[in-house]
Amino acid sequence: MTQGVALTADELAGVMDRAVCLHDAAAVNDALDRLARDITGQMADLRPLILGVMTGAIVPLGRLLPRLDFPLEVDYIHATRYHKTTTGRDLVWLARPQTPLRGRHVLLVDDILDEGHTFRGLLEHCREEGAMSVRTAVLADKPNAGRVPGLAADFVGLTVPERYVFGVGMDYKGYLRNADAIYAADPVDED
Ligand SMILES: O=P(O)(O)OC[C@H]1O[C@H](OP(=O)(O)OP(=O)(O)O)[C@H](O)[C@@H]1O
Ligand SMILES: Nc1nc2[nH]cnc2c(=O)[nH]1
């Protein structure tokens, strides 16, 4: 697998300085509250299996779970197509969930929906494994003309423009997932 570029603290500080804040920490909190309310409304009685899509889901899922006050199980699924870069390629599977999916109501949680190839592959996998239903939740939705036709998330926190975004789980070349707001990288940093 492609390794991330070793960026220095100065280089990362430059990326942050040039970036534009799209959704600040308060807006992200509100979006997580809304997501939790919507998910609860539809899934509270389904004893769902929630699958975090690693690695990006780690922050939004970790913040969503304490907001969900009903019986649920959590596992993870790991597939990547950006490999710590800013350009998507083929979906590479790194881990399949250990929990059997047969007969389960599954909720896939990810940080961002962009072209949709990741969700398409994961939805296919869950259905092949016999899930009774599969829903999708994302913190950030990036509508674009390259989207897999007909693919949309069931639960969306925020919308972002067609820029490379990072923060709240989303990486910039493997870094900055820990930023507590959602930023758009400057075009000079997008290569
Ligand atoms: O809709 P798509 O165009 O398929 O892109 C969305 C996917 O891209 C990112 O994952 P990435 O492959 O970068 O792995 P990561 O979660 O480790 O950052 C993100 O976490 C989504 O899973
Ligand atoms: N971090 C990050 N990951 C993505 N995966 C697909 N699009 C994006 C994006 O804009 N940012």
Image (spheres, grey):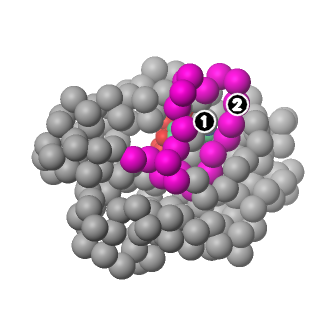
Ligand 1 closer than 8 Å to label 1 CB: yes
Q: Position of 7 compared to 3: left or right?
A: right
Q: Which residues are magenta?
A: 135-155
Q: Amino acid at mark 2?
A: Asn
Mark 1 neighbour class, 10 Å CA radius: few under 14, some 14 to 19, many 20 or more: many
Seen at 50% across and 64% down, the residue is 38
* Residue with the mark numbered 1: 114
Q: Residue at x 83, y 43 (%)?
A: 186
- Main SS of residues in magenta: loop
Question: Is 169 rendered above or below residue 82?
Answer: below
In screen coordinates, is 70 left or right of 102?
A: right
Assess mark 2: CB under 8 A from ligand 1? no
Three-letter amino acid code of the residue under disc 1: Asp
Give the labeled residue for mark 2.
Answer: 144
Assign a secondary structure to mark 2.
loop
- The quarter of the picture where the N terminus appears is top left
Specify which label sits upstream in the sequence, 1 or 2. Answer: 1
- Residue 63 position in % (x across, y down): 48, 71
Q: Is residue 157 magenta?
A: no
Question: Vertically, is 10 above or below 173?
Answer: below
Label 2 CA crowd tier, 10 Å (few <14, some 14–19, many 20+):
few
Label 1 close to label 2 by CB (< 8 Å): yes
Question: Residue 158's spot in the image, x, y percent?
Answer: 67, 56
